Image: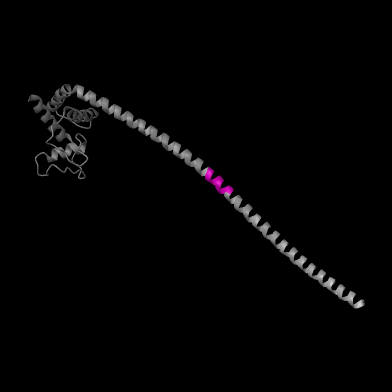
Amino acid sequence: MKLRRIMMAAMMVIALAAVSAHAATEIKDVDESSWAYKSIKKLVDKGYLAIYEDNTFRGENALSRTVFAAALAKLIDQIERGDLKIAGSDRDVIKKLSDEFKSEMADYDSKMGAIEKRVSDIESGKVVIQTDISKVTVEFRDRLDKVDATTAKLRDDITMLNSDLQKVNEDLQKERADRKKAQSTMWLGIGLAAILGVAVN
């Protein structure tokens, strides 16, 4: 019971010390007319408490030691940085709470450190992936440029071959016309020679 009173006092200290609420935060399951709304909103806006993904606070659920330790750790960090000024009696309450929740806060710090390391590793991996993507993109563009150059050269070669083929076809048609003309002349000559030969005899 005594611990519960200390926890409630600490939560009130946290609420009073928190910065004024941001209008953007909406808590769906706490009525704005409720006596606790402003305090809860301040705690959520300040980052001491989180709301669920569906923007509900679910205040009817029991507060776990881990969740309370996380809020307490954030409060102590702000006090140590000088962001919050706490009166002497409130400081004593926070000291008692920090002694009571020492193991949970250490566990919280350890988990946060592990999360930060994972985030850092993911960010490093992201940089490596982005570098690889950039490298592959440059290589792909180079290859595409080479393919474009080869395609352009092939088009030029095809155009030149078509031009040569057209010239050969024109030469061939001219040669056929010349042969036809020569044959016609030859047959005309043979016909005239035959007529002359008959006429002479």
Is residue 121 found left or right of 66 in the rendered image? right
| Residue 90 x/y as whole percent | 13, 28
Q: Nearer the viewer, residue 139 or 37?
A: 139
Q: For the stretch drawn in magenta, what is the main secondary structure?
A: helix
| Quadrant of residue 183 within the rendered picture | bottom right
Residue 148 magenta: yes
The quarter of the rendered structure image containing the N terminus is top left
Residue 143 picture location, percent across and down: 53, 43
The quadrant of the picture occupied by the C terminus is bottom right
Q: Which range is magenta?
A: 143-150
Q: Is residue 152 above or below residue 85?
A: below
Q: Residue furthest left?
A: 1
- Please say if 58 is above or below 183: above
Q: Is residue 166 magenta?
A: no
Question: Outermost residue, right direction?
Answer: 201
Tell me where residue 81 appears, x and y as whole percent.
24, 29
**In this picture, residue 175 sits left or right of residue 199:** left
Q: Residue at x 15, y 22 (%)?
A: 100
